[in-house]
Image (spheres, helix red, strand yellow):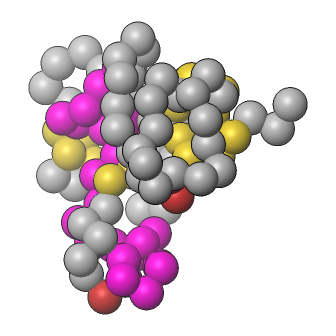
Amino acid sequence: MSEYADPYIHYYLHGRISSFVVKKPLILGHECSGEIVEVGRDVSRLEVGQRVVIEPEFVCEKCPYCRSGRYNLCRNVKFYGTPPFNDLRGICITVSEQKVQPDSR
Ligand SMILES: [Zn+2]
């Protein structure tokens, strides 16, 4: 299997991806959506009640990749829906404005 295959196939078949090991039941999938319940004072393009989709990764925001805007290459990235994170249903999370896209309706 290619190392570039869908990561969730690795979880299903092998119970792990590199150092991310499934140790308890895991809801597969890291894409998430929700509704804004609060915004920070510097947030300008989002408002309370707006439906949004959320980029599912945490990055360090300190490495050269993050500082240059190429955070998709951050070596410290962690994803929602990948151990140790699981099941975002019904919880509140805090994310930066750049990681949120409004519903197109
Ligand atoms: Zn980084």
Quadrant of the image containing the C terminus = top right
Q: Is residue 33 left or right of residue 85?
A: right
Give how far across and how far down residue 61 sits, in percent.
Answer: 29, 70
Residue 81 in sight in this render: yes
Give how far across and how far down residue 92 sits, in percent.
Answer: 36, 23
Residue 15 in sight in this render: no
Q: Is residue 25 above or below residue 51?
A: above
Is residue 51 located in the magenta-colored stretch of the structure?
no
Q: Is residue 38 left or right of residue 58?
A: right
Q: Residue at x 34, y 38 (%)?
A: 94
Give how far across and how far down residue 46 sits, in percent.
Answer: 62, 43
* Rendering quarter of residue 33: top right
Q: Which one is in front, 50 or 77?
A: 50
Q: Which one is in front, 2 or 50?
A: 50
* Rendering quarter of residue 49: top right
Q: Residue at x 57, y 28 (%)?
A: 48
Q: Which residues are magenta?
A: 65-87
Q: Is residue 43 left or right of residue 17?
A: right
Q: Residue at x 35, y 31 (%)?
A: 93
Q: Which one is in front, 23 or 15?
A: 23
Q: Residue at x 59, y 53 (%)?
A: 44
Q: Residue furthest front?
A: 41
Is residue 71 located in the magenta-colored stretch of the structure?
yes
Q: Is residue 61 above or below residue 45?
A: below
Q: Residue furthest top?
A: 90
Q: Which one is in front, 88 or 44?
A: 44
The total number of labels drawn is 0
Give how far across and how far down residue 60 sits, in percent.
Answer: 25, 66
Name the dominant secondary structure of the magenta segment.
loop
